[in-house]
Amino acid sequence: MFEHLPVLPPDSILGLAAACRADTNPNKVDLTIGIYMDEAGVCPVFEAVKQAQRQLIDEEVTKAYIPPQGDQAFIDGMTKLILGEQRLADRAGHVAAVQAPGGCGAVRLGAEVLKAANGAGRVWVSDPTWPVHLPLIGSVGLEITQYRYYDPATHGVNFDAMIEDLKQAGRGDIVLFHGCCHNPSGADLSTEQWQVMANMAADQGFTPMVDLAYQGFGDGLEADVIGLRALVDSVPEVVIAASCSKNMGLYRERTGLAVFVCNSQRDADATASQAKSAARRIYSMPPAHGAIIAGRILADDQLRSTWELELNAMCERINGLRAQFRDQLQTRTGRDFSFIAREKGMFSFLGLSTEQAQKVRADRSLYMLDSSRINIASLNAGNMDAVVEAVASVLA
């Protein structure tokens, strides 16, 4: 029966990465996939992760399933990291959390619970958003609509348009926010703009859902959740999808958490039961290794200190790469690329047309998305000049 299946096109991002791997040009540069690369072009393993793994080798005595809600040390550490200890205490009994296979799994669990709570609700997503948000949320049957977010002309948030669109979101609707380091634009809301969103949620009754994939990669662990915490302080219900792929480098371990901030303990118990039921029918049991590692790091003072130093160094390096890339592009082209240094996290739109992005790929083996979105964290001293020259070649 498989002869009746159509061959689907490759994923727009993963397909380009595969094309880059097949490219025989020794000077090729891959700026497509969102992973952090060090100066050697390697996605490194955190020293804190290595230390936690060594401890686990010595102490782990079983590979039995962990409970369906996940590793409790991981859940406790992550909810405290996201919400803050005092806020978590203030909402004691009103917060439910279920471990998931990565941030993707957390988004899907959140969508499953939201669908069960109100199947008629709309989910508002930013234009643009991470492309996988659409199938993850749409696959549960929720209606998806977009709100304007990024303005290519200014390379920033079109906040007036965002407000205008979200005035239409009401009770029963869900608004998906990027907690920090917006993917794919790198353009984040200011603290003041987050508070406006929180006030709108409180006044209009829509439920915020926050994708928190990059905590610590923007302005730091605490600063990157100022907006999320403003939402939690303003409305009775918030859904959060968190991930340790980036901030602990646990990409392949699929380490995520779906968090449900609720209006009562009964509601928290209900959301947890719904999330665990959805998990059971989708993937049965959560993976353990990454969550146990992350839980140990968050609970151990020495491991946590080591991790935070490493994460801060990564964040500082990304910001340094942004400044350097801005300066070299402006010097080489005479154009304004100041927006690159204002953005947060790993991603940026360079403002090239589809034809220009495809031309640098064909002529220079510089791989970026057709939208000209690049991963800043893939730049290094060895490829920066070549990338600048490639971009300049299509702007001449």
Image (cartoon, rainbow, N blue to C red):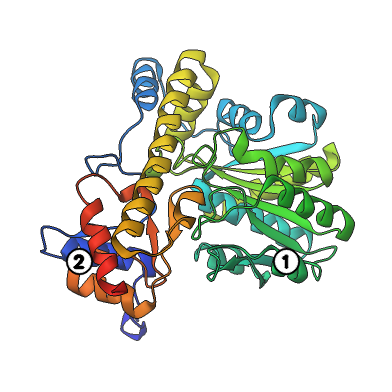
- Counting from the top left corner in percent of width and height, residue 310 is at 40, 27
Query: Which residue is labeled 1 in the image?
Result: 160
Local packing at callout 1 (Cα closer than 10 Å; few below 14, some 14-19, many 20+) is: few
Front one among 140 and 312: 312
Query: Which residue is labeled 2 in the image?
Result: 365
**Res. 27 image quadrant:** bottom left
* Picture layout, residue 112 above or below residue 64: below
- Label 1 with label 2: CB-CB less than 8 Å: no
Q: Quadrant of the N terminus?
A: bottom left
- Nearer-N-terminus badge (1/2): 1
- Counting from the top left corner in percent of width and height, residue 56 is at 39, 21
- Counting from the top left corner in percent of width and height, residue 37 is at 31, 44
What element does badge 1 sit on?
A: helix
Question: Which one is closest to the eye, mark 1 or mark 2?
Answer: 1
Q: Residue furthest right?
A: 203
Q: Amino acid at mark 2?
A: Ser
Q: Is residue 277 left or right of residue 351?
A: right
